[in-house]
Amino acid sequence: MTPDSKKESLLVVDDTPNTLELLQRKLTSQGYQVYTAPDVAQAIKILESTPVDLVITDLKMPKVSGLDLVRHIRENLKDTEVMMITGYATIEGAVKAIKIGAEEYLAKPFTDEELFSAVRRVLAKLHSRRAARNRTPSRSVAPHGLIGESGAMLKVFDAISKAASTSATVLISGESGTGKELVARAIHYSSSRASAPFVPVNCGGIPEGLLESELFGHVKGSFTGATDSRAGFFQTADGGTIFLDEISETSLAMQVKLLRVLQDKEVYMVGATHPTKVDVRILAATNKDLLRLLEKEVFREDLFFRLNVISIAIPPLRERGDDIVLFTNHFSAKFAKEFSKPIPRFTEKVLRAFKTYDWPGNVRELENVIQRLLLMTDSDTIDVPDLPSLMRFSAQRVAGLNRTLAEVEAEYIRNVLASVNGNKTKAAQILGIDRKTLREKIQKIPPLNGFM
């Protein structure tokens, strides 16, 4: 801390006067502004009138415990961190303290360095959170509608920037609803082709018998119903970019034709005897593991390597941390404006439920959830009871016996994942399955009923 920087303020709460005096003296020697309180009631009075960066509280105190103080701080103060100390250290106590919001749990007796190190760690987290909150929108919202501050998304933004500066093909992978088309659009509109067409094609949404004609066009009389010649998507995208979504859904025969376009930069219209040259950049996307499809010989290896010159993997929403809060704020403002309603406040418990829910439908599912909440909730505050039932499991709601086996399994998987902070390797060990099986089960968990 520099001499002219603002002192960080600490509040020490302990029912033992000697402990209060000792901690105040030690922490003051480190340059902190230190307040003291002998019980929770007086601590709350100080917090109501004095900005405090960090509260250091004892666990066992008369009348009201340190855990109750932690709950009070978490529910009423957004900009104060908490650290717990105790002479009655147990694993259960530590877990409970951390779960309700304490950043550190320090067992007595502890050395001066252990105390100082713990305080520095907690304050560093507080400063990081403040810095993230104070960033300008341009730091959290990338061009072309992409949102994110997580490390994983910053890597995606960097990859978009690099891909936009080249003309190479790009393979975008990610679960359904993660925003693969948004990434493709960001690449196109950041590239030298931005003024030319961007043509998205859902390969899985066009019947196989029509896909060739839709992609490459057809000449008059080439098949029944072809009353005139018509250009395909590739000709429409000439000079620009074509985005082939769900590329894994194409047949092997179609994959051969796409490979020819990549190699020769020309297409054969259905019924034509001569090729048509096209200048098109190809971006492709998939929500499936193409390497597994290669092993099953349902996707061509040569096409895969032609597409996979640059690869961008979009992380699922459940692995994006506080990006969920950014999306919540973005979508609530969007739909509040659309429905002419005030922007609601989401309680800390709701945001915690959002962070622990598995989001099988990813960003698209979250958007639908927020839209439904704004439509169906009259209050300006959205709390846990307003959430759909499956999401309330993330808030530890006790379930009844009227659910299917699939619903029970989905709930248990979500709770195990939440207990290990989303670590799939640890979750798989607890569940007694391998990581691959866990990933497959996660993908099969259905989205919220009525929210997709």
Image (spheres, helix red, strand yellow):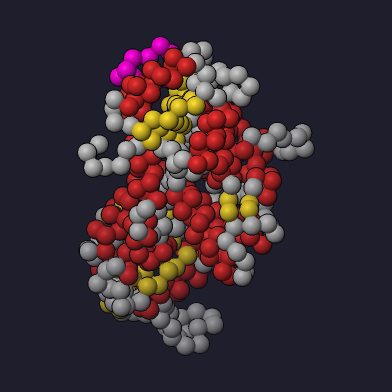
Q: Is residue 215 left or right of residue 46?
A: left
**Residue under the point 43% across and 86% down:** 229
Please indicate, yes or no, whether residue 117 appears anywhere in the rendered image: no
**Residue under the point 39% across and 44% down:** 129
Image coordinates of residue 396 in percent, x first then y, are 64, 34
For residue 275, which quarter of the picture? bottom left
Please indicate, yes or no, whether residue 192 appears anywhere in the rendered image: yes
Q: The C terminus appears in which quarter of the rendering?
A: bottom right
**Residue under the point 41% across and 37% down:** 53
Image coordinates of residue 78 in percent, x first then y, are 49, 43
Q: The N terminus appears in which quarter of the rendering?
A: top left
> Could you say which is closer to the camera, residue 443 or residue 365?
365
Q: Which segment is the magenta one?
A: 106-114
Residue farthest along the bottom direction in this orientation: 228
Image coordinates of residue 410 in percent, x first then y, are 61, 37
Q: Is residue 421 above or below residue 143?
A: above
Magenta stretch: residue 134 in it? no
Q: Is residue 180 left or right of residue 430?
A: left
Q: Is residue 357 above or below residue 374?
A: above
